[in-house]
Amino acid sequence: MLTELPHRRLNPLTGEWVLVSPQRTARPWQGHVEATPADVPPAYDPRCYLCPGNARAAGRRNPNYTATFVFDNDYPALLPPGSAPRLAPDPGPLFAAEAEPGLCRVVCYSPRHDLTLPELALEQVHAVVETWRNQTLELAALDFIHHVQIFENKGEAMGCSNPHPHSQVWASRHVPNEPAKEAAAQQAYLERTGGCLVCDLTREEAARGTRVVAANASFLVIVPFWAVWPFETLLLARRHTAGLPDLEPQEAQDLAEILRAVTILYDNLFEVSFPYSMGFHQAAWREPHVDAHHLHVHFYPPLLRSASVRKFMVGYEMLAMPQRDLTPETAADALRRLPATHYRARSAASSEARS
């Protein structure tokens, strides 16, 4: 019945519900159509603020880097302690505000302007994972940092301001809303059952298989039962691991492998560089109950029916609750059936064979 009738599903990581309306998948679409990129980007763009050797928007010049490159964001959302005037509190209970110090960094995946995560070689993706690990360790060691958020906005559809493949690291004094909700849910589950919510979820999803998209020895990727975005996925560590610094060397290699695998599937779905917002949720080291937290990664891609039709979070979603038409099981099956080789690599191989 879950494949035919409207129903709602609970997200145990947040305690929130999503409305699923599978009967609406046949409705016609006459709404906005996204423009799709016509050309493959160049390997180097002299106008790009992130390419090696180029001047950035604020005037600093990038080194001629040959691997991953990390720098402090020139236009950060957070500032370190002491770099801004003291915030005077507004009297009264209805207008609470407080200072939020932190640091923001940019991680360029490679010098190549044209190679996104799924098109990098496995060893290059592994270098990105190691960079994220090192950034987490370095930032978490600062006494004013309680949370390290790693994320990537890929593509214009997700608001990416520069097409050179990169991610960001924002480290803050307070734990942000979404990780805080998940931390509370995981702690409550531990107190209620004595077990780990994500460990139990990982084992159950691996056993059922219907929502599994990709897997290796250390990680599992699923379309979660409560997914909001059409082809949303959740990457889960099989071993109970609080964060990136706790990964064993082989697990770090396996993480690189499965990140590359799932992003290849995304690109292959509509044969386009697939937009998404992706982010790691890992423990906040100075908060209580760290042991309840289990490392996982969220992928939120907006595309719905094709490379040019996306899901919009408006109306009912903004005012009532999230809603989706395509069931998570259908989405998982569509992704799981795709080739494991990137479509551009297959196309290049085909062209070589013909010539």
Image (cartoon, rainbow, N blue to C red):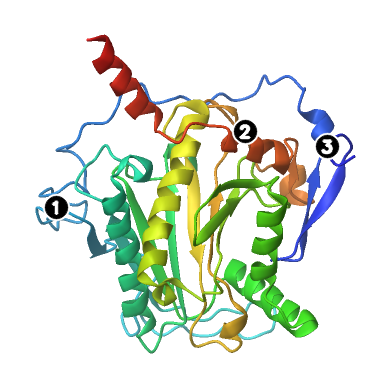
x and y, in percent, of residue 198 in the image: 65, 68
Report helix, strand or loop for mark 3: loop
| Spatial CA span between label 1 and label 3 | 49 Å
| Spatial CA span between label 1 and label 2 | 36 Å
x and y, in percent, of residue 59 in the image: 15, 55
x and y, in percent, of residue 141 in the image: 35, 85
Quarter of the view holding residue 2: top right
The residue labelled by disc 1 is: 66
Answer few, some or many: residues within 10 Å of disc 1's Cα (few below 14, many 20 plus, some between 14 and 19): few
Report helix, strand or loop for mark 1: loop
The residue labelled by disc 2 is: 334
Among the two numbered marks 1 and 3 on one chain, the one whose residue lies closer to the N terminus? 3
Q: Which amino acid does label 1 sit on?
A: Thr
The residue labelled by disc 3 is: 3
Is the Cβ of the residue at disc 3 closer than 8 Å to that at disc 2?
no
Q: What residue type is labelled 2?
A: Ala
Is the Cβ of the residue at disc 1 closer than 8 Å to that at disc 3?
no
User: Which residue is drawn at the image coordinates 34% and 21% (left, top)?
Assistant: 347
Left or right: residue 253 versus residue 220 is left
User: Which residue is drawn at the image coordinates 42% and 59% (left, top)?
Assistant: 255
Above/below status of 144 relative to 139: below
Nearer the observer, 100 or 210: 210
State whether residue 137 appears in this view.
Answer: yes
State whether residue 159 appears in this view.
Answer: no
Left or right: residue 124 versus residue 279 is left
